[in-house]
Amino acid sequence: MTATNPHAHLRIVLVETSHSGNIGAVARAMKNMGVANLWLVNPASFPDEASYARASSASDVLDRARVVDTLDEAISDCVLVMGTSARGRKVPWPVIAPPECAERAAGQAGRGDVALVFGRENHGLSNEELQRCHYHIHIPSNPDYSSLNLAMAVQVICYELRMQLLRSLEDAGEETALRPILQPGDAGWDVPQASVNDVDGFFAHLEQVLVDIDFHRRENPRQLMARLRRLFQRAHLDQMEINILRGILTAVQKSAGASQNRQ
Ligand code: SAH
């Protein structure tokens, strides 16, 4: 594992892919999620135009892809091998879902390489190949239509790998895209936060309007103002929002007064 690539210990292994466009789409899915190492076991055609066309700007992943003849060559130096399968197999094997796969893969960082193995478009991985794996990963898809396109399956797994990485960065106190980066009250917010005084002024005004329009009776309050206070406090109002809300209240008062005068 290096500081620049926290996923350096992970490799995506594609076994006997028949459509090279899928290899390109896999490269793109990997690079979007920060996974770089692609191993190809006996691909039908690679490198070729279709793979590079589908890779878009992830051609560097294809440039560095390792092409080998057998699955054994792709996994022999790995400490953990997880194989994906769209369906159950005769001999039951430990099956895990993508988030647990990501957790186990992250757990090996610094200990050795981890292979995530994907099968052929037409008939997946053979039972023998799956038996070379410590775990089987099943993406919990629709049981009536369980088989994803190869690159989409890689995308789901790589997304979970990335989520796992972001969670561990969060745990280490780093800011990540998992948390909203800008919130009301933060330095980059366009309007200053409303003060307690501003908000109290708004609530007093709101209560008065609700009394004026006969919605609220002070002698029978039924927690109305507490509930409204809780609602608006969840919004972390800024000063402009307070001004808009008070403008609306004033317009309501004028309009209600005008209609009372007409009666
Ligand atoms: N028809 C094949 C599936 C091929 S899909 C079969 O029945 O096995 C191509 C590859 O995408 C699979 O080998 C697997 O690596 C991956 N894949 C597709 N759907 C998946 C799912 N629901 N869970 C895990 N991997 C899946």
Image (tube, rainbow, N blue to C red):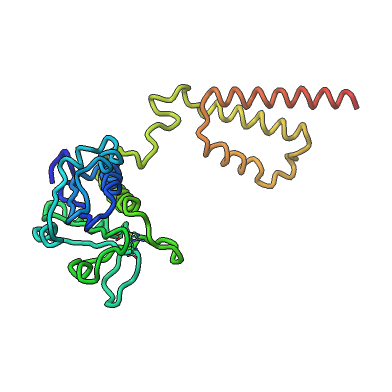
Question: Could you tell me residue 143's position as x and y percent?
Answer: 43, 66
**Which residue is located at x 62 percent, y 32 percent?**
203
Q: Residue furthest bottom?
A: 91
Question: In this rendering, does residue 194 appear at all?
Answer: yes
For residue 49, which quarter of the picture?
Answer: top left
**Which residue is located at x 65 percent, y 22 percent?**
247
Question: Could you tell me residue 238's position as x and y percent?
Answer: 51, 27
Quadrant hosting ligand 1: bottom left
For residue 94, which quarter of the picture?
Answer: bottom left
For residue 182, which quarter of the picture?
Answer: top left
**Residue nearest the observer in this picture, 33 or 71:** 71
**Which residue is located at x 68 percent, y 27 percent?**
249
**Residue nearest the observer in this picture, 28 or 1:** 28
**Which residue is located at x 56 percent, y 26 percent?**
241
**Residue 28 higher or lower than 101, as above or below:** above
Question: Could you tell me residue 6's position as x and y percent?
Answer: 19, 44
| Image side of residue 14 versus residue 221, left or right | left
**Residue 136 higher or lower than 189, as above or below:** below
**Residue 183 higher or lower than 61, as above or below:** above
